């Protein structure tokens, strides 16, 4: 089976505007966490040190993007359309454009068979906040009943409610012809197809935190089957609003003091945000065009945890995804020296993932040297629907540079890494690629609902 070549990449993550900057931050073990800015979340409204406090979060740490501006004039977007549309749409269009330019395919000749697949969940926080405008009738009824009970009536009541309506709606754009499309997740992909006149199909996949890696596997299937000749695959997640922050806090998913990954004391993650895109093409076609290839996707595997759970990961489901990926790749998981893991830093998540990888590697080759493992979430937080593509960009940069990156966020290695003859290891600093070992990597992403995804990568030709 022909491989799928990664011929272009672009991204926007905290403290990284390009894949090169993201890679340099990985090598420097830079962590991009800070307090969530007050314009994104009012701590007075939503923070409590008590994890059981209703409608509150006990953590305000996150990796946020600062200083991003979308050039709507360059993309010929009207002011009304821009204001009515979630920023996730515009960042995805912007980064997709950069990925095409990186591949040297900004004006290519296969528009009829170019597709766009985007990983996203819940669109973005702007979409959810803008719907508050349409909730005014409910709020008006509640306020009116309260004021009437206090003796308000007639002109005084009407004038007060009218002024409240104006103030309440002022921050939100009026709903118009662009509002519905600008609030939907699927139209993120459609918007990219529309801008570039791509006619191979565009859609959004939602596999929670596995979304963007699922976008890559869906694109790979379409390329190998011949349905597409070129694919843009990626993910975008710009969402740090109360629904998600309070929701994760109620699950106990946030770290309390530090975000640790694959560490004995891992106890949760801190959220992040971002966007990444790959330009994908069949390996033979990329070679025929003389394109630079960052890495080649050799295999992929998808599985579910079945009856094991919705939010709790299961070893058996992850093992199925690993076995399917390397069966498709045509080589054993024991020959892979580097794994870019899902690595959320939760106690059960890290344990399950390390155990599954260890079992799979020992089954494949009990004598294989331990492979390096890390997770980019320790650098940029858990970017949810954009997490898998960030991991894939990191792994591709490692392969093209032939460097094993250091493991950020692990000071006291997890017990699964300290067993006799361990299958995996953490790196305190970067290392040259091991002599005599294949230039290969594996990338995992798992999501709410019990979805398990793994991609097998190999170095491409210069």
Image: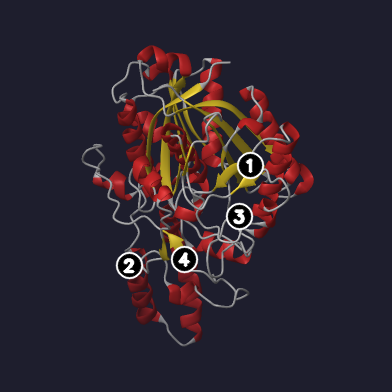
Q: What residue did someone put label 1 on?
A: 370
Q: Earlier in the sequence, mark 2 or mark 3?
A: 2
Residue located beneath label 3 in the image: 262
Measured along the vertical axis of the image, is residue 100 above or below residue 123? above
Looking at marks 1 and 3 on the same chain, the residue that comes earlier in the sequence is marked by: 3
Q: Nearer the viewer, mark 4 or mark 3?
A: 3
Residue 200 falls in image quadrant: top left
Q: Secondary structure at mark 3?
A: loop
Q: Earlier in the sequence, mark 1 or mark 4?
A: 4
Give the numbered dot on residue 11: none
**Rendered image quadrant of residue 299:** top right
Foreground of the two, 433 or 241: 433
Residue drawn at x 71%, y 32% is: 365
Please say if 366 is above or below 246.
Answer: above
Q: Which residue is mark 4?
A: 61
3D distance between C-alphas at marks 4 and 3: 19 Å
Residue extending farthest to the bottom is 151
Gap between marks 1 and 4 measured at Cα: 33 Å
At 72% from the left and 41% from the top, the residue drawn is: 317
Q: For the residues carrying marks 1 and 4, which lies nearer the camera in this image?
A: 1
Cα separation, mark 1 vs mark 3, equals 15 Å
Q: Nearer the viewer, mark 4 or mark 2?
A: 4
Disc ID at residue 166: 2
Q: Nearer the viewer, residue 193 or 300?
A: 300
Q: If you read the primary sequence from the N terminus, does the residue marked by circle 2 or circle 1 appear first?
A: 2
* Residue 433: image location, x then y, percent: 49, 36
Q: Nearer the viewer, mark 1 or mark 3?
A: 1
Q: Earlier in the sequence, mark 4 or mark 3?
A: 4
Question: What secondary structure is found at the residue carrying circle 1?
Answer: loop
Mark 2 Cα shell of 10 Å, populated few (<14), some (14-19), many (≥20): few
- Which one is in front, 28 or 229? 28
């Amino acid at each position: 089976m022909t491989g799928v070549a990664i011929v272009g990449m672009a991204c926007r993550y905290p403290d990284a505007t390009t894949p090169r900057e993201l890679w340099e931050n990985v090598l420097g073990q830079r962590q991009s966490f800070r307090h969530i800015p007050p314009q994104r979340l009012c701590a007075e409204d939503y923070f409590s040190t008590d994890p059981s406090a209703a409608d509150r979060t006990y953590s305000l740490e996150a990796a946020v993007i600062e200083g991003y501006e979308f050039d709507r004039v360059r993309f010929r977007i009207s002011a009304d359309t821009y204001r009515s549309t979630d920023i996730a749409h515009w960042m995805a269009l912007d980064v997709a454009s950069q990925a095409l330019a990186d591949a040297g395919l900004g004006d290519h000749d296969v528009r009829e068979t170019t597709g766009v697949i985007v990983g996203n969940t819940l669109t973005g926080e702007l979409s959810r906040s803008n719907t508050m405008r349409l909730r005014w009738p409910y709020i008006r009824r509640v306020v009116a009943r309260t004021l009437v009970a206090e003796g308000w009536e007639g002109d005084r009541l009407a004038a007060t409610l009218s002024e409240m309506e104006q103030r309440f709606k002022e921050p939100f754009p009026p709903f118009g012809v662009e509002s519905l499309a600008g609030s939907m997740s699927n139209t993120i992909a459609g918007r990219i197809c529309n801008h570039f006149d791509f006619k191979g199909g565009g859609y959004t996949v939602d596999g929670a935190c596995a979304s963007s890696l699922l976008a890559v596997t869906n694109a790979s299937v379409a390329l190998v089957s011949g349905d597409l000749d070129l694919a843009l695959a990626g993910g975008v997640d710009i969402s740090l609003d109360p629904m998600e922050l309070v929701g994760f806090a109620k699950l106990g998913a946030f770290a309390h003091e530090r975000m640790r990954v694959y560490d004995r004391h891992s106890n949760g993650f801190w959220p992040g945000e971002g966007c990444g895109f790959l330009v994908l093409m069949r390996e033979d076609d990329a070679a025929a065009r003389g394109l630079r290839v960052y890495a080649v996707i050799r295999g992929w595997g998808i599985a579910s945890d079945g009856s094991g759970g919705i939010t709790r990961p299961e070893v058996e489901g992850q093992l199925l995804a690993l076995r399917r990926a390397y069966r498709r790749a045509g080589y054993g998981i024991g020959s892979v020296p580097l794994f870019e893991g899902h690595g959320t830093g939760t106690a059960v998540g890290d344990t399950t993932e390390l155990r599954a990888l260890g079992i799979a590697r020992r089954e494949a080759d009990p004598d294989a040297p331990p492979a390096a493992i890390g997770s980019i979430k320790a650098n940029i937080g858990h970017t949810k629907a954009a997490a898998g593509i960030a991991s894939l960009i990191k792994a591709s940069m490692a392969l093209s540079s032939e460097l094993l990156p250091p493991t950020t966020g692990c000071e006291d290695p997890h017990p699964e890494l300290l067993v006799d003859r361990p299958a995996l290891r953490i790196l305190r600093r970067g290392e040259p690629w091991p002599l005599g070992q294949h230039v290969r990597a594996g990338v995992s992403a798992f999501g709410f609902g019990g979805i398990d995804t793994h991609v097998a990568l190999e170095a491409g030709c210069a």
